[in-house]
Structures are given as C-alpha cells and as structure tokens.
Image (tube, rainbow, N blue to C red):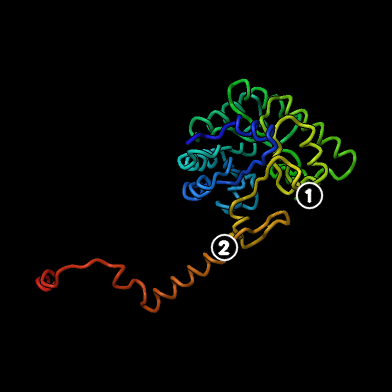
Amino acid sequence: MTKNTVLTFRKKKKEGKKLTMLTAYDYTMTKLVNACNVDAGLVGDSLGNVILGYEDTISVTMDDMVHHCAAVARAADKAMVVADMPFMSYQISVEETLRNAGRLMKEGRSNAVKLEGGGRVCPQIKAMVEAGIPVMAHLGLTPQSINALGGYKVVGRTKEKAAELLEEAYAVQEAGAFSLVLECVPDKLAALVTEKLDIPVIGIGSGSGCDGQVLVTQDMLGMNLDFSPRFVKVFAPVGETVKKAIADYVQAVENGTFPAEEHGFSIEDDVIHDLY
C-alpha cells in the first residue's frame, strides 16, 4: 500500500481533486479512517478537548502529542500522519521548535507537523523545512490563541482582516509550508486564498472552495454530545448508537440475559463434580 505524502497533496491540487483529512487520536479509530482512503489523519491538539477532557487545547503537552501520534502512526499505513505542535512548543525559539518537531517525527512517527500562525512563525517553518520536516500551516481561527482572540470567532470579515489573512497565507507558503489549513474563514475569502496559493488549502468551517476539508472525526460521527459547531455535518449518529448499545448492555447484565450460554466455555460435569 502506497503511503500518502506531501506529493499526494501537491498532485491533487494540480489535478483539481479534493483532499480529505480527519482527526485521529488512537489506533482503533485510525484503522477505520485509514481503511476508507482518507488522505491524511490529523493528530490534532483537539485531543485535549475530545480525548483528555480539557476545556481548550492550551493544556495539551508535547508528551500528550507524542503518545497519541505514535498510536496513530501504528495504524496509518496509507494515510499521511500530520501532528499538531502544541501550545508553547514552537513560540519560544527556532531551536526549541526544531527539537519538539523532531520528537513528533522520531518518537511519534508523524509524517509532517502543523503549527498555527502566519508571519511570526515563518522563521520556524523555514527552519523545519530546511531540516527535512514537512510543515502544514494554520490560519484563520487559531484555537491556541483563543484567549488573545477573545473567543471562537470567524476571521477575515473586514477588508483589513481579509487582506491581512491573504498576506499571511502568502508568507507561510513562501516560508515553505506544503499546505495550509483555514479555519472559520468566510467562504468567498477562503476560495480566493485557495485560488491565489500554489499549495493546497484545507478548510474547516471555510466553505467548499478550498482544495480539501478536515473535520474532527468524533464530531462528524455525532459522538460529541455536548456541542456541535455550525460547520459540522453529522454523517452518522454514532454517538446515539453507542449510548443505546451501552444502555442495552447494562440492562442485559442486570436482568441476567448476558452472558448467555453461547458466550461461555464448557467443561465436563465429572471434573466439576470431583471438586465438590
């Protein structure tokens, strides 16, 4: 089975074929994602919310990311594995960025890393690319900056902010990013950025004009029972199905219908008789 790489992204952009990416945080779910020919599995720092129960992504550590990335990599023999660089793993210095990205590649066995920001992180992008580490950039709503942004908001609605976003997109491309994620950007602006850039643009809450899409897998499966963003489409109500299955299990155990005879293992009666 051929492994997807940055060349896969480049080729699909050139041919006008849509790219698909879903989040992946563990071995079992990644096996399912990988089996469905999804182009890339994103080990997002969203694992803080989805898997670890944090209120935001800021608390996610490098050790968290390495641990989950390694599990995902063991299952992804085709899907490209992209690992988020967590908060404060790349903001301190270029040297610290290289050290942390190296851990995600060596220990986590990722195929690329992703980081948030535009011009301010271009030195880090350039250094990683020069070191042989593929980099995916991320603009628009950047969850690690949620405290500075003042909440989860659509980015780029004014003329000034739209021009700034386009400028930042050009900057990360020039720095060497092989792809760009645009989160919560107005549809027409995201389509314009996609048209202007040579690198593939992956959208989330940014309309259909991007080169591809990414969603949190648990969101598109209806497994997030607390909140579902406006831009999410639930493709199957798996959360409700799982809840019903668990409720049925509890009921079956409590009323004695599980386990039944077919779920057990037999032994000769005389063996048991001699033990009395």
**Residue 102 seen from this side:** yes
**What's the residue type where badge 2 is placed?**
Gly
Q: Residue at x 49, y 71 (%)?
A: 247
Quadrant in which the C terminus appears: bottom left
Classed neighbour count for the residue bearing mark 2: other residues with Cα under 10 Å, few (<14), some (14–19), many (≥20): some
Q: Is residue 3 left or right of residue 137?
A: left
Image height of 248 relative to 28, above or below: below
Residue 146 at x, y percent in the picture: 73, 46
Q: What separation in Å lies between label 2 and label 1 (alpha carbons)?
A: 27 Å
The residue nearer to you, when weighing 97 against 1, is 1
- Determine the secondary structure under disc 2: helix
Marks 2/1 in contact by CB < 8 Å: the verdict is no
Quarter of the image where one finds residue 128: top right
First in sequence, mark 2 or 1: give its number: 1
Q: Residue at x 86, y 45 (%)?
A: 157
**Residue 180 seen from this side:** no
Image height of 44 relative to 219, above or below: above
Q: Which mark is residue 153?
A: 1
**What's the residue type where badge 1 is placed?**
Lys
Q: Nearer the viewer, mark 2 or mark 1?
A: 2
Q: Residue at x 40, y 76 (%)?
A: 254
Residue 15 at x, y percent in the picture: 68, 34
Residue 23 at x, y percent in the picture: 59, 46
Classed neighbour count for the residue bearing mark 1: other residues with Cα under 10 Å, few (<14), some (14–19), many (≥20): some
Residue at which label 2 appears: 239
Residue 49 at x, y percent in the picture: 61, 52
Image height of 80 relative to 132, above or below: below
